[in-house]
Image: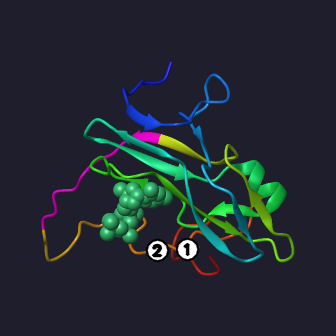
Amino acid sequence: MSEVVEIEIVADQVPAYALPGDAGADLRSNETVTVGPGERAVIGTGVSFVMPEGVAAFVMPRSGLAAKHGITVLNAPGTVDSGYRGEVKVTLLNTDRDAAFEVRPGDRIAQVVFMRVARAAFTSVDALPESVRGAGGFGSTGFGAQSREPGTPGA
Ligand SMILES: O=c1ccn([C@H]2C[C@H](O)[C@@H](COP(=O)(O)OP(=O)(O)OP(=O)(O)O)O2)c(=O)[nH]1
Ligand SMILES: [Mg+2]
């Protein structure tokens, strides 16, 4: 079973996990909004909560809305800091070129995932230790079925 974190919440509609084993609890809109084609909207959920320190919440898109309607969370994953006491909001983007997307109160517009997060203690250094990857990135291992060592010709 997954780790359970205790969350104190103020909400008209408490986020709920649709099925056992789900990682994301669905967030519901508390407003009526029309998101036009290519437009975005910041939508309230009426939810605010307190997380234990060391835990953060991430606002994620729902795959069904993405696949069926072209709806995503613009800043996905939206980061909710443990010190945040305001209303969790969802910035939806309608990527559909033609159809407006209608949101009504109670509609499940996104999902929230809770995770333990690390905070960095930064130490400035002059050079970094070597690694196999080095500075290779952005497709350096190739795109086809055959994987290649970073930096080899044709990769
Ligand atoms: O999808 C999101 C993302 C963020 N937030 C809230 C909680 C988060 O703690 C706060 C700040 O978010 P973020 O750090 O991503 O935004 P910022 O543009 O850096 O604002 P700030 O200067 O307030 O940190 O806004 C949401 O409600 N929904
Ligand atoms: Mg910030």
In the image, residue 155 lies at what x, y percent?
A: 62, 76
Confirm or deny contact between disc 1 and disc 2 (CB under 8 A). yes
Q: Nearer the viewer, residue 98 or 70?
A: 98
Is residue 135 something that shows in the picture?
yes
As drawn, the residue found furthest toward the top would be 1
What colour-coding does the image apply? rainbow
Which secondary structure dominates the residues rendered in magenta?
loop
Is residue 132 something that shows in the picture?
no
Q: Secondary structure at mark 1?
A: loop
Please report the residue visible at 78 percent of the width from the left and 63 percent of the height from the top. Answer: 101
Query: In the image, 142: left or right of 50?
Result: right
Q: Is residue 98 above or below residue 7?
A: below
* Amino acid marked by disc 2: Gly
Query: In the image, 50: left or right of 139?
Result: left
Q: Is residue 140 above or below residue 132?
A: below
* Quadrant of residue 103 within the rendered picture: bottom right
CA neighbours of label 1 inside 10 A, class few (<14), some (14 to 19), many (20+)? some
Please report the residue visible at 59 percent of the width from the left and 73 percent of the height from the top. Answer: 139
In the image, residue 84 lies at what x, y percent?
A: 32, 51
Residue 19 - label: none
* Quadrant of residue 97 within the rendered picture: bottom right
Q: Is residue 7 above or below residue 85?
A: above
User: Which residue has dot 1 on it?
Assistant: 140
Q: Which residues are magenta?
A: 114-123
Is residue 91 shown in magenta?
Answer: no
Q: CA distance from mark 1 to mark 2?
A: 5 Å
Residue 136 - label: 2
